[in-house]
Amino acid sequence: MSYFRRLYQDSPVPMYIYDNDSYEFLEVNDAALRQYGYSREKFLSLTAFDLRPKEEIPTFLDANRHVPLSFNDFGIWKHIDRSGRIFHVHIYAHLTIFNGRKAKSVLAANIDDKVKADAEISQKTAEIKEILENLRAIINTTSDKIWSMDTQRRIITANESFWTWLDACPKSIPAIPCSEFLPADWNDYFDMAFSGKTFSVIWQDTLSPKPLFAELSFNPIRNEKQEVTGISCFSRDITERQLYLKMIEKQNAKLREISWFQSHQVRGPLSNIMGLVDTFNHDDAADPNNAKIIEYLKQEALKFDGVIRKISEEAQPNR
């Protein structure tokens, strides 16, 4: 066996030669026999059509008409081995003369694992893209303001609510330090977050003509070395909730006041009435002192009525 023939047979890359007109195999190396699962004798009894799914044969015939003299990349094809398993190969081919017959020499590299891996990567990429799009939709449809900034305090990303709140175009802000357009008293919060602290605060806009409260959250963004490279920020309008809490606190204070009033102001007239009742002469209704006691009872009853009225007034809402 010549050196070049041995080089062909021992090549780790599957190769074969088939007749240009009959498509019968004329030669095959050991790597191709291992790839397709045939003995040498059986392989050489086949044609190039036997290695392909039927649906690809018309495309194969068309490509076969345009094979150049030099090796040419014919791309990725599906082939079939002896067991019927379909796998992907990358085909390189050129025209040649073999034993006086016009033929085509083919290199068929098995890339099935790569094709499947690429397909899986494409699928995962599409899934991740869909997740990101859904996440972006969720972030941009919330009324909460979400943004992040780098160590130079420039905006990196922000949702639509944030830009709407600033009444600014996203492209006009990122190069500007946020201290120029965000509330000045937030700078202390940014300092804490850049120092590595994660925290939330209730903030009141003291410059707003109307009551305005927000829940602010700050989270450091760290790299693989755990160095803070930025911060993510979150702002939620809680004005309605805070005003409701203040109303509840005011009502509770009023209830405490009423409770104190009841325990102190009601007790006086009530004790006097009870004392007068005890001194009333039940055995002799004509007792002259009974008339005085009744008069005193009327006076204490009026006092008691006044206390009840005051409690009722204090209990009225919006007072």
Image (cartoon, rainbow, N blue to C red):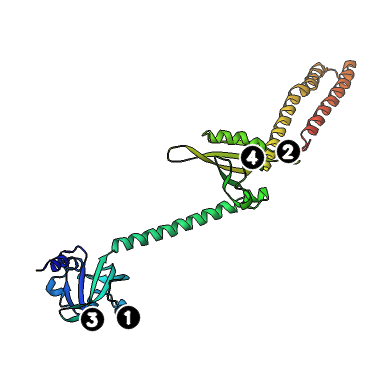
Disc 2 target residue: 207
Is residue 24 or residue 212 the one in the foreground? 24
Earlier in the chain: of badge 3 and badge 4, it is 3
User: Mark 4: which secondary structure?
Assistant: helix
Q: Amino acid at mark 2?
A: Leu
Spatial CA distance of label 1 from label 4 is 67 Å
Q: Residue at x 55, y 36 (%)?
A: 193
Q: Nearer the viewer, mark 2 or mark 4?
A: 4
Disc 3 target residue: 20
Q: Amino acid at mark 4?
A: Ser
Label 3 near label 2: C-beta < 8 Å? Answer: no
Disc 1 target residue: 62
Mark 1 residue crowding within 10 angstroms, few (<14) / some (14–19) / many (20+): few
The quarter holding residue 113 reads: bottom left
Mark 4 residue crowding within 10 angstroms, few (<14) / some (14–19) / many (20+): some
Disc 4 target residue: 179
Spatial CA distance of label 2 from label 4 is 16 Å
Q: Residue furthest bottom?
A: 21
